[in-house]
């Protein structure tokens, strides 16, 4: 085994980055990362998993829990499941991928209940496997990968990828926050499973999701797809974080004067809520649930009710103010483009899984929240981990360590001296002004998107030149790097949104309200200083017939 | 946001320091209750509460720090009202409890209701028939 800690020869003694060696390094600590680590380990690889937070509590699945796209393998049930969001997604999903994800998810959920020891509820003698409670699921995943010998580094955000002279990925470099020191992992392959990007909106469990993996992948040449479908907003009681949305299906919405907010609803009518919030407060009451439903709701999602309990609100009988928080590519679908069924990115040694990767393949342009995303996380994680292991094990024989170059740029290695005022605070202000607002990102219009993109481009230029490293007496390089990742994400998002001059899926343009049959294709976006967008030559397969 | 580390209850195990995904706590230099070192980094995810073995932590549901007058800063009130430790209790973590996951079966979800001009009122005097369901 290759466990010997090494020291990187070119660093000074003081800043020496502790280095580990592994076959596969998994970046992230949510469902996608843990399934990737598990399948890589089961494929015979020596695995290190590095999480920004704590693997087991970090990310929205851990804190929120998820419904899962778990469908019995009966043809009629599978057909209905695949057809359900196809139209909503603008026919950009691919049936071949849906079939694979449904099969893999079915298998994984079974394993979770047996080998993973997850305590699924039992009704009429059968386990109910259509959802998981977050803290329990992720605690079990952590325990499971540890039993499989995966080494877990908590509080160790990865900052950048390491590449060899051919451009292949050979490891990662990051920062151990609780030890306040840099570290490296040298590995034959890396899986990026860093989640989506919610732009620091405060939506439940998403503050760790700042799009770091997409930036790292783009820096080594990977492309992104579906970035125009990145404007998901979740409903939450005002002034709180809890964007658990399912139960708002039972809600009515009201103006502050108590009159009904006509047309408002949790799904189709969410834009009505956004418009009303631009003018003032919106109130809500879960008045469509009878007593039996209420009791089931309390059992189903205790954390939904936690907030109300502590606020002293009975959501079934009281009216409470609500807000919409940006969930970006967490419940949107954009992410790193995958080039094959292994979730390879096209960059040798680099794989992508979960929300870090595009979910257009199974969701099209519609949200993957509620079921598809969780299924994608465990399926893509399984495939990416297995393929990464195969790639890395094939390289085990190669003598010695290749010379590795750190690939990180924006927010890490500014091209000039640090500039006063260019910091992560500045970036958060830009995001608050141009990315969070409903009339920029949700209710889209070219006349509002273009100036927003210009402001983001300007922020990018400034941070590229003058942002990097810690500030003051805090050596933590992570906030600056996260700031750069969020700006990069927003630029890909708006560039794609401007290129798609139609409405499709969750991307709705007020200046192009109709769907244009001529734009039935996916958009591939990439680039850092220069962002470019192209039509994906791969067309979605709408049927599985061979 | 995280508001309370109860010095009376805390056993200094530092589990919260380890599990908080946004690294909000620092261990106390000389042992004892951890310090809320970076409150504004708290993402109100309630995970620390779920893991604290003695219900010594309280996370207020608000995404901003509470005003000092808030009753949610009063540990005695929180304990008396059952709010302290309520999340851990709900998810059935802790010795002798049944994991909440075992019973977490929600209701079937209907398509989302759309509010109509004559919305259903909370007022029981307005007849059900007045809704435009
Ligand atoms: C409130 C809410 C409810 C949801 N409900 C559902 C649902 O019911 N059904 C459904 O299918 N989907 C749902 N979703 C979406 C679902 O939560 C995500 O799709 C899922 O969590 C994705 O898993 P992931 O592993 O890809 O990423 P995440 O769960 O976001 O995990 C990302 C991980 O990467 C780590 N990380 C980030 N950056 C770095 C870095 N630089 N270095 C190292 N580690 C890093 C983070 O710490 C975290 O551990 C919901 C989302 C939200 C916000
Ligand atoms: S987890 Fe609870 S008992 Fe342990 S240190 Fe934190 S507050 Fe104290
Ligand atoms: S609520 Fe979440 S983010 Fe806040 S202190 Fe607790 S674990 Fe950390």
Image (tube, grey):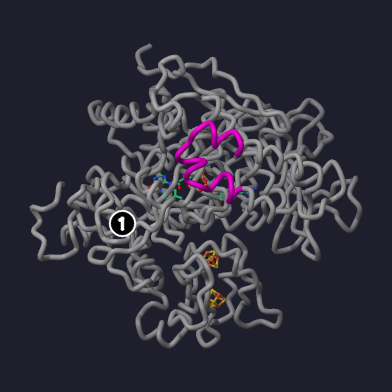
Residue situated in front as seen by the camera: A136 or B34: B34
Using the image, name the chain to which the residue with label 1 belongs.
A
Q: In the picture provided, is A301 more to the left or to the right than A340?
A: left
Residue A424 lies in magenta, yes or no?
Answer: no
Residue B98 percent location from the top left of the image: 32, 67
Stretch in magenta:
A431-452
Q: Is residue B95 above or below residue A250?
A: below
Q: Is residue A427 above or below residue B18?
A: above
Residue B29 percent location from the top left of the image: 71, 79
Residue situated in front as seen by the camera: B123 or A380: B123
Q: Is residue A191 visible?
A: no
Q: Is residue B25 visible?
A: yes
Residue B95: quadrant of the picture: bottom left
Residue A508: quadrant of the picture: top left
Residue A443 lies in magenta, yes or no?
Answer: yes
Q: Which residue is mark 1?
A: A255
Find the residue positioned furthest to the top. Answer: A546
Residue situated in front as seen by the camera: B40 or A13: B40
């Amino acid at each position: 085994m290759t466990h010997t800690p090494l020291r990187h020869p070119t660093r000074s003694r003081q800043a020496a980055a502790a280095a580990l060696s592994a076959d596969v390094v998994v970046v992230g600590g949510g469902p996608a990362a843990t399934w990737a680590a598990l399948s890589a380990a089961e494929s015979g690889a020596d695995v290190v998993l590095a999480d920004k937070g704590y693997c087991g509590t970090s990310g929205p699945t851990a804190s929120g829990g998820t419904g899962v796209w778990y469908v019995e393998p009966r043809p009629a049930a599978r057909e209905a499941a695949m057809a359900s969001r196809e139209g909503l997604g603008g026919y950009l999903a691919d049936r071949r991928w849906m079939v694979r994800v449904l099969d893999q998810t079915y298998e994984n959920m079974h394993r979770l209940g047996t080998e993973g020891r997850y305590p699924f509820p039992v009704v009429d003698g059968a386990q109910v496997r259509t959802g998981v409670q977050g803290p329990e699921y992720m605690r079990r995943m952590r325990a499971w990968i540890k039993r499989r010998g995966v080494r877990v580094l908590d509080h160790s955000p990865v900052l950048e990828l390491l590449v060899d002279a051919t451009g292949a990925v050979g490891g990662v470099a990051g920062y151990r926050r609780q030890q306040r020191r840099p570290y490296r992992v040298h590995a034959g392959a890396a899986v990026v499973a860093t989640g989506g990007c919610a732009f620091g909106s405060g939506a439940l469990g998403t503050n760790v999701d700042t799009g770091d993996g997409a930036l790292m992948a783009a820096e080594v040449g990977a492309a992104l797809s579906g970035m125009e479908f990145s404007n998901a907003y979740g409903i939450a009681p005002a002034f709180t974080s809890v964007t658990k949305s399912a139960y708002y299906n039972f809600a009515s919405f009201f103006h502050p004067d108590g009159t009904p907010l006509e047309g408002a609803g949790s799904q189709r009518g969410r834009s009505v809520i956004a418009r009303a919030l631009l003018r003032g407060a919106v109130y809500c009451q879960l008045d469509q649930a009878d007593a039996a439903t209420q009791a089931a709701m309390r059992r189903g999602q205790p954390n939904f009710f936690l907030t109300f309990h502590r606020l002293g609100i009975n959501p079934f009988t009281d009216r409470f103010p609500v807000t919409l928080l940006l969930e970006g590519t967490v419940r949107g679908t954009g992410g790193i483009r995958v080039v094959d069924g292994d979730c390879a990115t096209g960059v040798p040694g680099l794989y992508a899984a979960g929300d870090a990767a595009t979910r257009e393949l199974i969701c099209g342009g519609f949200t993957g929240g509620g079921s598809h995303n969780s299924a994608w996380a465990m399926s893509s994680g399984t495939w990416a981990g297995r393929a990464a292991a195969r790639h890395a094990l094939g390289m085990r024989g190669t003598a010695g360590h290749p010379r590795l170059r750190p690939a990180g740029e924006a927010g890490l290695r500014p091209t000039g001296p640090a500039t006063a005022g260019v910091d992560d605070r500045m970036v958060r202000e830009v995001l608050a002004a141009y990315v969070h607002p409903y009339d920029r990102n949700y209710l889209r219009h070219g006349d509002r998107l273009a100036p927003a993109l210009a402001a983001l481009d300007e922020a990018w230029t400034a941070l590229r030149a003058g942002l990097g490293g810690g500030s003051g007496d805090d050596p933590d390089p992570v906030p600056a790097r996260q700031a750069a990742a969020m700006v990069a994400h927003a630029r890909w998002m708006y560039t794609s949104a401007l290129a798609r001059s139609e409405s499709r899926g969750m991307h709705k343009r007020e200046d192009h309200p109709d769907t244009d049959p001529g734009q039935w294709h996916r958009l591939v976006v990439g680039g850092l200083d220069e962002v470019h967008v192209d039509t994906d030559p791969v067309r979605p397969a709408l049927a599985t017939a061979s | 946001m995280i508001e309370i580390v109860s010095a009376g209850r805390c056993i200094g195990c530092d589990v919260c320091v380890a599990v908080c995904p946004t690294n909000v706590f620092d261990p106390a230099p000389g042992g004892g209750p951890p310090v809320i070192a970076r409150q504004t980094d708290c993402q109100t995810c309630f995970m620390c509460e779920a893991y604290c073995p003695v219900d010594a932590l309280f996370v207020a549901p608000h995404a901003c720090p509470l005003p000092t007058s808030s009753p949610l800063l009063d540990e005695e009130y929180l304990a008396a009202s059952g709010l302290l430790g309520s999340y851990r209790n709900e998810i059935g973590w802790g010795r002798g409890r049944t994991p909440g996951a075992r019973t977490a079966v929600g209701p079937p979800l209907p398509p989302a209701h759309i509010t109509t001009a004559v919305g259903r009122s909370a007022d029981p005097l307005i007849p059900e028939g007045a809704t435009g369901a």
